[in-house]
Amino acid sequence: MSSRIDLHCHSTASDGTLTPAELVRAGAAAGLDVMAITDHDTTGGWAAAEAARPAGLRLVRGAELSCRWHGVQPSISLHLLAYLFDPAEPALAEAMRHLRTDREQRGERIVEKLRADGVPITWDEVHGYAAGGSVGRPHIAQALIRAGLVASTTEAFASAWLGARYFVPKIDLDVFEAIAAVRAAGGVPVFAHPRATKRGRVVPDELIVELADAGLFGLEADHEDHSPAERAEIRSLADRLGLVVTGSSDFHGTHKTVQLGAFVTAPEVFEKIAAAATGVTVLG
Ligand code: AMP
Ligand code: FE
Ligand code: FE
Ligand code: ZN
């Protein structure tokens, strides 16, 4: 039996636009057999996703961690997907709490910069869009769209706006420490969209070799931000290093155009991820 597996999806617990309950229902409606909830720096959507999980949909509890590699100057940010870790493990939980607190302060600073230039948005508005979840630039983009200054989230990320002019860095986890923390919590770390050049500089293969030695389990190859050539490069690097490759939509609701299940992960890869985890089990 074929199985449709999407291992990277966001809800309103971070910068997605569907609630966790709506997300799992949409996953089932899209014909997914397995879906992961991977909000930025939080497990805040897990309980609601679990409670609403439709029969027949298997749910992988995860998160996408904001990380940074300090091996070059200036350092490079990257995202680490973490699956099936114990959410109560103190070091990882505390690290995520720290990231979320900084996201709030940084969001407020971006809004202040915009307001200093006369842009009519407020932190209250932006904070309201985040609705208690991890605050991200897509929430500020939402305020810029509401104010009629840009037409889309993509436009809000242009260099005239959140991409450069009003960019404020956020705190990130050292990527080696993040991999160690995920493993210590019984989780499985996978490097999200490692070649996504449109988001900024990407790390060299030499770093990925080191990350594999440090406990990285896989690379996300099939992702809308990768060209076919980049996907092939990632596959061959993963083969060489003994890493699995995943594919996923990185669904964000209406903050992006990509649909659930637009890219999927092979069943045997999913089984390897589930077997490698000792934090929490796959539901369903
Ligand atoms: P932040 O985590 O606050 O730095 O915001 C980054 C988030 O914004 C990512 O997780 C994506 O959801 C979204 N994003 C990043 N780059 C773009 C882009 N060029 N266009 C639209 N959304 C983007
Ligand atoms: Fe996002
Ligand atoms: Fe990401
Ligand atoms: Zn993501």
Image (cartoon, helix red, strand yellow):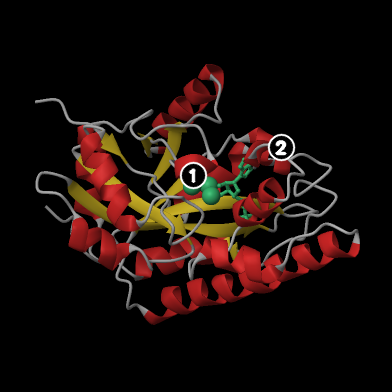
Q: Is residue 114 left or right of residue 202?
A: right
User: With respect to residue 273, does 278 lie above or below?
Assistant: below
The quarter of the image holding the N terminus is top left
Q: Which mark is residue 192?
A: 1
Percent across and percent down for residue 140 are 67, 56
In the picture as drawn, the residue positioned furthest to the right comes out as: 117
> Can you give x and y, in whole percent of width and height, for residue 218 in the image?
39, 43
Q: In the rendered image, which residue does mark 2 sit on?
A: 155
Choose top left, top right, bottom left or bottom right for residue 247. top left
Residue, x 30% and y 33% (percent of image)?
265
Cα separation, mark 1 vs mark 2, equals 23 Å
In the image: residue 169, left or right of residue 176: right
Which amino acid, mark 1? Ala
- Mark 1 Cβ and ligand 3 under 8 Å apart: yes
Name the residue rendered at 55%, 24% in the picture: 230
Instruction: Tell me if residue 134 can be seen.
Output: no
Marks 1, 2: nearer the viewer: 2
Position of residue 279 relative to residue 188, above or below, is: below
Numbered label tally: 2
Q: Is residue 23 left or right of residue 66?
A: left
Looking at this view, is 135 or 220 the one in front?
135
- Is 222 situated above or below 8? above
Residue plotted at (43% across, 69% down): 181
Who comes first in sequence, dot 1 or dot 2?
Answer: 2
Question: Which of the pair 122/262 is nearer the observer?
Answer: 122
Q: Crowding near pointer 1: few (<14 within 10 Å), some, many (20+)?
A: many
**Badge 2 element:** helix
Q: Are marks 1 and 2 in contact (CB under 8 Å)?
A: no
Question: For the residue labelled by badge 1, is the local secondary structure a helix, a strand or a loop?
Answer: strand
